Image (tube, rainbow, N blue to C red):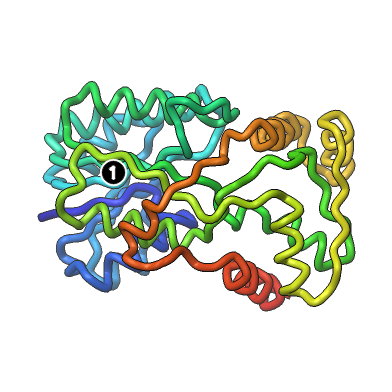
Amino acid sequence: MKVLVTGATGKLGSKVVEILLKTVPASQLAVSVRNPEKAEGLRSRGVEVRQGDFDHPETLDTAFAGIDRLLIISADGDNELRIRQHTNAVTAAERAGVKFIVYTSLANATESTNLMAPPHVATEAAIIKTGIPYSFLRNNWYLENEIGSIQGVLAGATWVTSAGTGKVGWAIQQDYAEAAAAVLVGSGHENTVYEFSGPLLTQDELVSALGVVVGKEIPVQQVNDEKYAEIMKGLGLPDFVVPIVVGIQESIRNGSLEVESNDFEKILGRSVTPISEALTQIVNAISQIK
């Protein structure tokens, strides 16, 4: 069995690879990365490093050759770019004769009003069309997405949001990575959809938990989308990013990430990392960077 992880030098991909190396012989593990130089550390540990670029389908034919089980980690970028890149990856997997595709999707993807849902809907449909057995990992929200806000709070800022009482199933990337690795090399996951979500919390509940971790009360400022956009622009976010972060707040407010599920527990064989422990890990990591 030959297993391949795309985006293996990214934040999630690198965690998945580290987990796999504990259970899978390095000789059975390959990675596809845009820049192989960044994966030299993996090569030195016996992992096969292949050059693969979602923007250049011809590189993916080589990257996916001889692969049995493939994890496609969703790329970054705007929706149009991601749809094109993911489609390139899926069609290359079909050409290569890959036998099982695992894809990191988004919570409740096919029914979602989330700003970021369209690429996931398109990718899931493209994978199903190939007829290749699949597993869709519909990941809720990474707690690491809130690092900027947490850093601001640690520096004395107020937590600003326009998400209202919308709930999110935050979990740390390590939990998502462990689940992805388990599905990728485990048995019985063909043609499955998993909703990976932590306990649902509002912004106020998350910030309250953070306050306990850092030992101080953190004020929360609920604003409308226009004010949120103005504040984000004032913080120096590029103009093209502002509508994205506002759209994320709006989609949370509208309940797009309010997905209750115990799929994490089913796959991990344990509870998801408690939010207080997860926040402690992030706060400690931020402190170490300083």
Say above or below: 211 vs 231. below
Q: Is residue 141 left or right of residue 93?
A: right
The residue that appears at 19% across and 67% down in the rendered structure is: 24
The residue that appears at 84% across and 37% down in the rendered structure is: 228
Q: Nearer the viewer, residue 110 or 166?
A: 166
The residue that appears at 38% across and 35% down in the rendered structure is: 54
* Image quadrant in which you'd find residue 87: top left
The amino acid type of the residue labelled 1 equals Val
Q: Is residue 102 left or right of residue 211?
A: left
Secondary structure state at the residue bearing disc 1: strand
Residue labelled with disc 1: 102
Mark 1 is surrounded, within 10 Å at the Cα level, by few (under 14), some (14 to 19) or many (20 or more) other residues, namely many
* Image quadrant in which you'd find residue 116: top right
Picture coordinates of residue 278 (x, y %)? 58, 68
* Image quadrant in which you'd find residue 88: top left
The N terminus is located in which quarter? bottom left
